[in-house]
Image (cartoon, grey):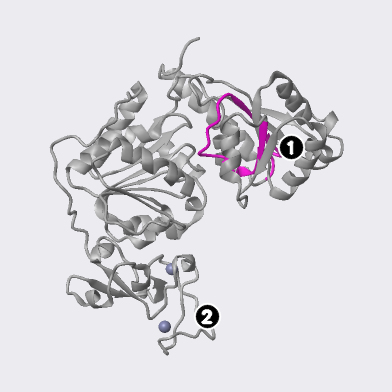
Amino acid sequence: MSEELIGREVMFSECKNVKADELKKDDIYKSTGFYQEKGVERCRRCNTAIVEIEHNECTCGQPCTYCTNCLQMGKVSRCTTFYHISEKNDFQKSIRPHLKWEGTLSDQQKQASEDILRSIKNNEHCLLWAVAGAGKTEMLFPGIEHALKEKKRVGIASPRVDVCLELAPRIQQAFPSISVSVLYGASEEAYRYTQIVVATTHQLYRFKEAFDLLVIDEIDAFPFRLDKSLHFAVEKARKKGSSLIFLTATPDRADQKKIQQGKINACILPARYHGYPLPVPRMVRERNWKKSLLKRVEVTKVYGEMKKRLEQKRRFMVFLPNINWMTRFSQVLANRFPTKRFESVHSQDDQRKEKVQMMREKKLDFILTTTILERGVTFEAIDVFVVGADDRTFTESALVQIAGRVGRSPKYPTGDVFYFHDGSTKPIKRAIKQIKTMNKMANQRGLLKND
Ligand SMILES: [Zn+2]
Ligand SMILES: [Zn+2]
């Protein structure tokens, strides 16, 4: 069925249910794989300038080449045809409420949610800067409700698959009468035409002028932050004059500056839902940590803090800059703490989900991880160590996100964060400053608990 083409711009090979015959219909708009802009040939899907590859053999038999930037989504060649049907917003207009969420918003959430609603009504842009644990998703509900009632199509995208997978069921639960689909690279599900789409930012490449409201979560996360073609995808996927909402817990330097200068319409939520301040990380010098932690761990400060917690049965996460070093360190720890239960996880780990689940169920005393767990995971009652915080993998935003793992639960709202380093860096100092600034702002606005 041609519903795969509504609000989308895709190749025949990307469609599962379209028959070749159907593509001849008049309402289907066809365009070439590449287009010319000021004498530069660009990929229509991702806007990247095309670099001619020699000896490219193509079935078209013409001088042909393809886009290497979006190759992982399927090959776009010079001879490619894209198909598109304009968005029809073929949804039920309703006066009855769709929203079936019965929680309550905190005062700052209420205010932010009104700001968002206003942006949506006026089809404006808005950046929501909400600290980890502020409760971002719920604040969107009134705005989404308004959009749905107006027959608008709603897109919610994040650079991270795990964030999408976590988000989709919550959205579906809040709006049970609305069809919600989830799109990501490895998804088994066939494409459906739905009023709400939850997707990775990469999936936006396949949309064209579809969304009246587009929300991008975790804009500071890799790869969205640095990838210009993903920003292009956002612009292509939304309708002209639609509303665009950006969400982040730690905007990058450029956005922080624009917010300070009042150049972007921003809404800042400095307090967590439970009203306790964010834990401020402590900087601890660990000289030559790469060697000392492997050779003489028992004399290090990291070891001292770990031992103390193991004795007190306080659980913790240890963030490390790379997989190789983590593997060696984990050997050292296995020898030192033979009776303790721990695991290490990284991006290429097949067992990642299971190990995270074990930590959640308190079957582990601690967990070693790369930055892969910097966002999205919540463990109760933990402390966090960053070992080698001076390593360049730990950006300002990664360090803030990592600190945000601590004290999320209202039952256990506090905890320790350590940045172990061998020489302070700008990201370390800026991360601590950012956290302190948010706490100060929360305090000034009277959002913190006084006990
Ligand atoms: Zn491309
Ligand atoms: Zn070709």
Along the viewing direction, whichever of 336 and 243 lies nearer the viewer: 336
**Mark 1 or 2, which is nearer the eye?**
2
Residue 37: percent from the left, percent from the top? 36, 72
Mark 1 and ligand 1: say if the CB distance to the nearest ligand atom is below 8 Å.
Answer: no
Task: Check disc 2 and report the residue beneath it.
Answer: 53
Horizontal relation, residue 305 to residue 120: left or right? right
Q: Secondary structure at mark 2?
A: loop
> Seen from this angle, which residue lies furthest top?
451
N-terminal label among 1 and 2: 2
Region in magenta:
366-391
Horizontal relation, residue 90 to residue 15: left or right? left
Q: Does the magenta run of residues contain 390?
A: yes
Q: Which quarter of the picture shows residue 207?
A: bottom left
Amino acid at pointer 2: Ile
When the figure is inspected, residue 370 is found, relative to residue 2, above or below; the finding is above
When the figure is inspected, residue 65 is found, relative to residue 169, above or below; the finding is below
Quadrant containing ligand 1 reads bottom left
Residue 308: percent from the left, percent from the top? 74, 21
Query: Which part of the image, by quadrant, shows the N terminus?
Result: bottom left
Along the viewing direction, whichever of 264 and 170 lies nearer the viewer: 170
Along the viewing direction, whichever of 330 and 225 lies nearer the viewer: 330
Residue 415: percent from the left, percent from the top? 60, 22
Q: Secondary structure at mark 1?
A: loop
Q: Does the magenta run of residues contain 378?
A: yes
Residue 158: percent from the left, percent from the top? 43, 48
Other-residue count near label 1 (Cα within 10 Å), few / some / many at <14 / 14–19 / ≥20: some
Q: Is residue 218 visible?
A: no
Amino acid at pointer 1: Gly
When the figure is inspected, residue 237 is found, relative to residue 129, above or below; the finding is below
Horizontal relation, residue 124 to residue 128: left or right? left
